[in-house]
Image: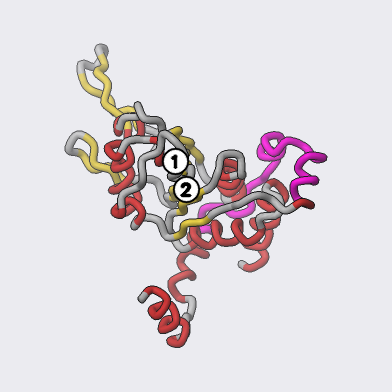
Amino acid sequence: MRTQLESCLAAVNQVLLGKDRQVRLALACLLARGHLLLEDLPGMGKTTLSHALARVLGLSYKRIQFTPDLLPGDILGTSVFNRETGQFTFHPGPIFAELVLADEINRATPKSQSALLEAMEERQVTIEGATRPLPEPFFVIATQNPVSQGGTFALPESQLDRFLMRVSLGYPARAAEKALLLGEARRDLLPRLEPVLDHAALARIQAEVPGIHASEAVIDYVLRLVE
């Protein structure tokens, strides 16, 4: 199991240079069945990280570009009338993927942001009175620009509560930035990534996570930090 996880980390780190700690945190978040919020300036590799994780974990991947005119139906899907059958046919939205990238989530209005609430908490969506389960596994990686930038809507507390981690990538170190300038484009490297874990292996690792021991002293320390 450890060998497989180290192989996943090594594969992602070949594409996202100089971000070993952030990549490890992102993988830990996904294995704990949480959701990840990446907050940083544009161009820091947020999209690259999510796409690379999807490829090495063998997950279906969808990207939703959040904009002020985005509607909940654009995320969840909608029913379209079929003249041949005389019935409405449901067309699932991009939320029906195993790894969903909610790109620049705080550029959309709160109404569209709230379309993710049920999906992230219950791993299902209710559309037109019908409850539809989402794929298993199901992960959301959301990115947001700093609130100080124009055209952003701050995420409400109920939305933030759905994320297990909030991570910032930051600027690369000088050596990593030089390697980026001298090397191939990251977009060209992504298609070469091969799945390291299959669904069965990922499910086994996720099942082991709740059994990880945390000492009482660590729990007390965390509680004191929160207080």
Outermost residue, left side: 129
Residue 200 as seen in the image, left or right of residue 56: left
The quadrant in which the N terminus is found is bottom right
**Which contiguous range is marked in magenta?**
176-202
Question: Which residue sits at x=48%, y=69%?
Answer: 209
Q: Position of residue 124 (x, y in %)?
A: 30, 47
Q: Residue at x 52, y 53 (%)?
A: 199
How many angstroms separate mark 2 from mark 1 (CA)? 6 Å
Residue at position x 63%, y 68% from top?
A: 2
- Of 204 and 96, nearer the camera is 96
Residue 176 is left or right of residue 108, and the answer is right
Q: Residue furthest top?
A: 83
Q: How many marks?
A: 2
- Where does the C terminus fall, quadrant-wise? bottom left
Name above or below for residue 92 compared with residue 227.
Answer: above
Residue 130 location, quadrant: top left
Seen as rendered, the residue at the extreme bottom is 217
Q: Label 2, on which residue?
A: 141
Foreground residue among 179 and 26:
179
- Principal secondary structure, stretch drawn in magenta: helix
Percent across and percent down for residue 225 are: 42, 76
- Residue type beneath disc 2: Ile
Q: Which mark is residue 102?
A: 1
Element at label 1: strand
